[in-house]
Amino acid sequence: MKTVAAQVITPEDLLKHWQGHRALTRRVIELFPEKDFFEFSIGGMRPFAKLADELLAIGVPALKGIVNREIQPYKEEADEKLIFKAQYLEKWDEATEEINKYWQELSVEDFSETFNLFGQYEFPVIQNVLYFIDNEVHHRGQGYVYLRALNIQPPFFWER
Amino acid sequence: MKTVAAQVITPEDLLKHWQGHRALTRRVIELFPEKDFFEFSIGGMRPFAKLADELLAIGVPALKGIVNREIQPYKEEADEKLIFKAQYLEKWDEATEEINKYWQELSVEDFSETFNLFGQYEFPVIQNVLYFIDNEVHHRGQGYVYLRALNIQPPFFWER
């Protein structure tokens, strides 16, 4: 049996934290005009649809890999290409449910175990999960600038 | 005595995580041309110097307040106004040391206690700390777009 060191956040609270961020990202997707979601960009960066592709390619597939200890390469292209914002929102909501489901299968001990995510990122699970969240916050910050540049007021950052 | 629920990250790892982000933000500050650091903006948003003001006004003052259980209002104006990027970098490094110092005074139990940060944000300490980090990642994401728009390659996101 492993000793679990005294630690500072429960799995339940971490899930709530992540899903709070995901809810905010969903609002950012919603706020983009249809065309700009797929096309607007600054400084040669990806449009927000491409960033959403990345976030969708990480969330569920990564968590599923972790839970099943199954190493699958990272794959950004979805099986069916999404061409409307409404499809992204639908996928987003499906992912919300899937993440909740897989999360229940993680034990506290799992978080300190090392997993080679996508066959590329060999870190303790907690670090991988924090990375998913940070990466989402980072790209969403980019989305906020796109919205402002489009003269659209982004949601308050603390609204989750 | 309180029961500490089974949790998933140690205070040491959370500090390392935060300081890793702070090191990355420092690199973003470094990459801005002097003038653009204070002036460049997109869509009416704050220039990166103003965002750095906010991050400096949160980090040490917030942590000091938490450690001393001393409620001080949020105050973004520094006692002396910083007018060169080099001054920001110096302040940043001082803050790095101060954060390390104050962090040592937090016990594991402190993270689940509620504190009314800046007299405005009454949440468990862990939530306040996660907020500092998220807020920094969010604004730094904004900085990445500014750099790209200035035709400057930002650091890799995973370099901490």
Image: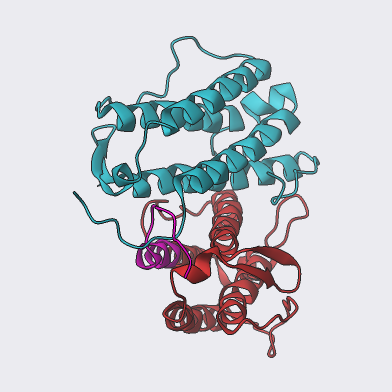
Chain colours: A red, B cyan
Left or right for A31, reference A66? left
Number of marks present in the image shown? 0
Q: Which residue is drawn at 61% across and 47% down?
A: B141
Residue A2 sits above or below residue A137 on the image: below
Q: Residue at x 42, y 55 (%)?
A: A155
**B7 or A53, nearer to the observer:** B7
Residue interval drawn in magenta: A1-20
**B119 or A140, nearer to the observer:** B119
The percent coordinates of residue A38 (x first, y second) are 66, 70
The percent coordinates of residue B49 (x first, y second) are 58, 27
Q: Quadrant of residue B24?
A: top right
Q: Which residue, as the protein is rendered here, is positioned at the far front?
A: A1
**B97 or A100, nearer to the observer:** B97
Residue B99 sits above or below residue A29 on the image: above
Q: Residue at x 41, y 43 (%)?
A: B129
Residue A153 painted magenta: no
**A149 or A73, nearer to the observer:** A73
